[in-house]
Amino acid sequence: MALLRSLIFNAIFYVSIIIYMIAGLPVMLLPRPWIMGFARGWSFYFTWLTAHVAGIKMEVRGRENIGPGPLLIAAKHQSLWETMALLQFFPDPCFILKRELTYLPLFGWYLIRTAQIPVDRKGGAKVRAELLKRTREAILTAPGRQLIMFPEGTRRPVGAPPAYRTGIAHVYSALNVAVTPVGMNSGVFWPRRSLKLRPGTVVIEFLPAIPPGLDRETFMTTLETAIETSTNRLVAEANHAS
């Protein structure tokens, strides 16, 4: 029954995202804030769809920790869920993502028109310098955007040892803005590389901000401790509830 429900959800999800992108093509002729609003509308639809078809509900904790203005958001990455759901919490979100995604028909066009930041993961110091320049332009130019990063760079299975990369420390130092860590347990209900979903409640927890100005080693330790402590607790809650 769970597998059948998952297959039905996946069919609806992938068909509806194509329909949504096609329906939004005229919106791409409008200024970027309009396109961003259209994309955020998808995020609300997505969480509604996962709740009503897949049985995966959402609980948000620590919403008061989301500060105003330009922010750096550092989120745990366990599944596809958070790449869709996080959009709805910020007025003008911006992702650092792998460059290959911009090559995809329709989806890549939206990434380009909403000024997301693609990066060549195999690039060296030159690519890093260009990345920092683009993030600085996006976040520190008035009125400022909210930069969403996944510090581990890719989805990690539930229970896997953390593998935080130093890229976020370079961005943190360059921007000199507060960082909001985000823990979650999405991988319990939507495992990576799996079509079989598990009904339950994804808890996303926005944690108290890490202030700017820390040295890189202290920042990385503080960030990893905050995210992993939250995530481990939320995963344990989910497993205990089942």
Image (tube, rainbow, N blue to C red):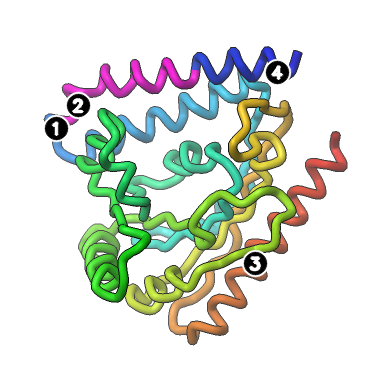
Q: Position of residue 142 (x, y in %)?
A: 21, 61
| Residue 48 vertical placement versus 118 (above, below) | above
Residue drawn at point x = 35 percent, y = 63 percent? 122
Please tell me whether mark 3 sits on a helix, a strand or a loop: helix
Magenta segment, which residues? 13-28
Q: Residues within 10 Å of mark 2 (few under 14, many from 20)?
A: some
Quote the CA–CA distance across marks 4 and 3: 34 Å
- Identify the residue at the far left of this view: 29
Q: Position of residue 176 (x, y in %)?
A: 37, 76
Q: Residues within 10 Å of mark 1 (few under 14, many from 20)?
A: few
Please tell me whether mark 2 sits on a helix, a strand or a loop: helix
Q: Position of residue 73 (x, y in %)?
A: 46, 59
First in sequence, mark 1 or 4: give its number: 4
What's under tag 4, amino acid-wise?
A: Leu
- Residue 27: mark in rendering: 2
Q: Tell me the residue that label 3 is attached to.
A: 226
Residue drawn at point x = 41 percent, y = 47 percent? 90
